[in-house]
Image (tube, rainbow, N blue to C red):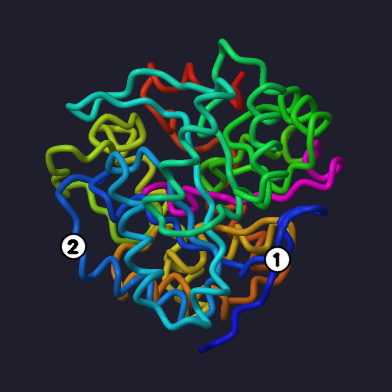
Amino acid sequence: MNTIPARALGSTGPRSSALGLGCMSMSGMYGGDGDRDESVATIHAALDAGVTLLDTGDFYGMGHNELLIGEALRTAPAAARERALVSVKFGALRDPDGGWVGHDGRPAAVKNFAAYSLQRLGVDHIDIYRIARLDPDVPIEETVGAISELVQAGHVRHIGLSEVGAATIRRAAATAPISDLQIEYALITRGIEEEILPTLRELGIGVTAYGVLSRGLISGHFTTDRKLGAGDFRAMSPRFQGDNLRHNLALVDSLRGIAERKGATVAQIAIAWVLSRGEDIVPLIGARTRERLAESLGALDVTLDASDLDAIERAFPADVARGERYPASQMTSLDSER
């Protein structure tokens, strides 16, 4: 097994590899059914490389992703399986056609979701458990309180949050110890820097950053003529539409020269930038193949000095991207954007 530097997920959370593996894309969220064998092989390769954090949601493929991770853990070497940390989001409700029908943070629902996740994953505890989106009808104290009871019972080790704003973070942290906030953070998505990140640092809460390549948009591999398949939710994302897409890809092109000078790929520069933002931030890489995993892990070998960071800032300044990260209907569910 290779070794990856470790980072602490907050003052009360576990130590994780500096990069985690986000497994969502392995369960059809980008269209298609995914490649089960390649997905399991990618998880195995990540564990073998020293990645310890695996991130999922019980609603990814309506349980498919948890079953996939469960299979990968069951067939991994015992030592790798014992090192793995599994982070699970819950609460997003779906219908049989795959539609999204709300969020449920009621205490009884929290415990019900956890019971099903434990069964699908084939584990005796969940390392980090978090509601995916704030339930507007349930106070965060009640949801976090229910997870705290699961911690006391030994079913969950740590409590996380996802996509919530500073006021909600404070209320949650006053209820129980919070390990980390999972939230989108990338060169193209920097909204947390104004209020959310300072609040987290004041309270000793870490960050697991998803969307560090903005769903492939700033990976250096996306092109204007790429056709998105049926079921690929990026087809509805404003950032991937028309003039917005052309503008955003022009920004990506401005990173290529920096990447070439560093002997790196554009994706590696984008991931290394997130890594550089603080030791309390663990980027989640959304690789669904071993090839993309290897490229992403290469970001750990990229060191960005002050001149590099200045060049990146000039090429890709904050708030220069066009288009929201989700369609308007989904943006309204983000407490972090209020």
321 lies left or right of 245: right
The picture quadrant where one finds residue 319 is top right
Q: Amino acid at mark 1?
A: Arg
Q: Residue at x 48, y 69 (%)?
A: 268
Secondary structure beneath dot 1 equals strand
User: Mark 1 or 2 closer to N-term?
Assistant: 1
Would residue 208 be counted in the magenta stretch?
yes
Q: Amino acid at mark 2?
A: Asp
Report the residue marked by disc 2. Answer: 35
Q: Position of residue 101 (x, y in %)?
A: 34, 18
Q: Position of residue 89 (x, y in %)?
A: 50, 41
Would residue 316 be counted in the magenta stretch?
no
Q: Residues within 10 Å of mark 1 (few under 14, many from 20)?
A: some
Q: Position of residue 229 (x, y in %)?
A: 13, 43
Tell me the magenta residue range: 198-216
The picture quadrant where one finds residue 243 is top left
Q: CA distance from mark 1 to mark 2?
A: 30 Å
Residues 234 and 309: in front is 234
- Can residue 216 be seen at all in this image of the molecule? no
Q: Position of residue 86 (x, y in %)?
A: 52, 58
Residue 83 disc label: none
Q: Residue at x 22, y 40 (%)?
A: 232
Residue 15 disc label: 1
Q: Residue at x 51, y 89 (%)?
A: 1
318 versus 80 height, above or below: above
Q: Residue furthest bottom?
A: 1
